[in-house]
Image: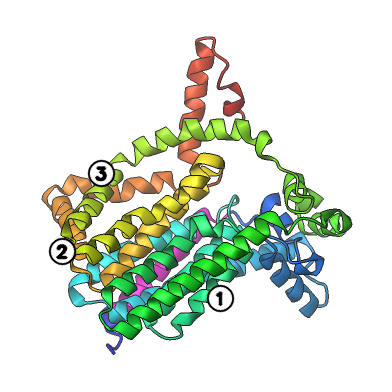
Amino acid sequence: MKTETKNDLNFIGLMALLDFVTLLVCCQWRVRSYNTTMLALDYKNGFTSRALLGTIYHRLNDLFGGAMMNYGAVCIFAGVATVGLVLLLLGFARRAMMICPAENRTKVQVLLLVLSVLAAATFSGGYNMLRVDEFMLMTSMLGLFLLLYEKAEWLVIPLSAIGVMFHQGYVFMYFNIILVALIIKFFDTEEKKKKQYYGLLFVLSFLTASLLFLYFELFSRTAGEGVYERVLSDATALSYQGIYHSTLLAHEVLGIDLGDTEFGLRMVNRIQFPLFMLGILPYLILLVSVLSHLGKSGKDTPQKIKYFFVWAGSLTMLPDFLLKCDYGRWVMSVAAYYLCIFIFLLVKNDRPTAEALGNVATRIKEKPAMLVFFLYPLLLIPFWDVDISEAIRTMNRWIAEVFEAFGGNIYHYVKWY
């Protein structure tokens, strides 16, 4: 095993500094009503969906003698969780640096910095601080860490369950990181027993997450009326000035389908998403060039299948993009997927990936002005939820103003969302 070098420690220090600065800039030290209300869900009311985080919080409350059932304690808990995310990213980066081939080190460091700043910015803001998405990403990052460490890799199976217990949307949003990493290890392993082992881990992880998803979606909201008042009381105590999220309780506790109420929010998405795609067009072109290179680099059928899954892994998000309205969350999960998988491939010394990303670096070096593109994305983060980001929301309002100036009112409600 390689030992840690001074350069590795310097990089970890730089990454920690950037994360600290990002938190100072982006952290609003507030937890919105959706996320405080989520803490009111608890397994003492039955094995219900999205209740793992609330169960953890309630058990901590019991440990501290009931002192955590207030908004101030929620904010402290949120701060600790955010620091925990940063520490996990730093630990993951440290492990990656220790086993990364020297020729891939710089590429991995750049991707780690992007992932770290993106996660710190997104999950410390008011919209997403203490959102379960943060814990879903941490779950997959921990699984990826174990697969890099190659110790106790079987823990990806219970981690798959834990991710769904935080939120059943995990199967679409962050589970692809673990699944594609297992596929990569399956096709890169020549030893028959190891190949069977990774194949078994994939099947058991997939089945575990899928069965839990189906249970939570179909059977976990049947006794909501009996516990509604208890959950409502907790949500009121945990939320700022007692303002809880009523639609979350209606959906998760009473099982009321709220899909018809989201039409306006989906209209926001339909307008903002093309603006966002236009804004990140240079990066889309680079991503397509990298994925195209990988597709052409497969020397045999197993390699072609592996790179197909690397590309297609992000398609697990397609149902959310088509049926749901929190496009900021979906964009974050897609970005995290490609960053994590490219890091994983580089650390595992996947030559086509190193070549593809090396070609991107060469093109940037040949045109120094392209370095601006590394700073430009900072204008588009942190990601939010229905609104993708502050910059995209502002452009959305400009469009609304233009339509109103010409007598149109189709975007009026979007402007004031």
As helix, strand or loop, the secondary structure at mark 2 comes to loop
Task: Tell me the residue at 72%/69% (across/down).
Answer: 55
> Residue 75, can we see it?
yes
Identify the residue at horizontal 62%, vertical 64% (top origin): 212
Report the residue marked by disc 2.
299
Q: Please report the residue visible at 71 percent of the width from the left and 65 percent of the height from the top.
A: 54
Left or right: 49 in relation to 152: right
Mark 3 vs mark 2: give the one in front. 2
The local secondary structure at tag 1 comes to helix
Residue under label 3, please give it. 285
Colour scheme of this structure image? rainbow
Q: Which amino acid does label 3 sit on?
A: Ile
Q: Where is residue 85 in the image (x, y as percent from the top left)?
A: 51, 68
Instruction: State whether residue 382 is above or below residue 71.
Output: above
Which residue position is annotated with label 1? 158
Q: What stretch is highlighted in magenta?
A: 8-27
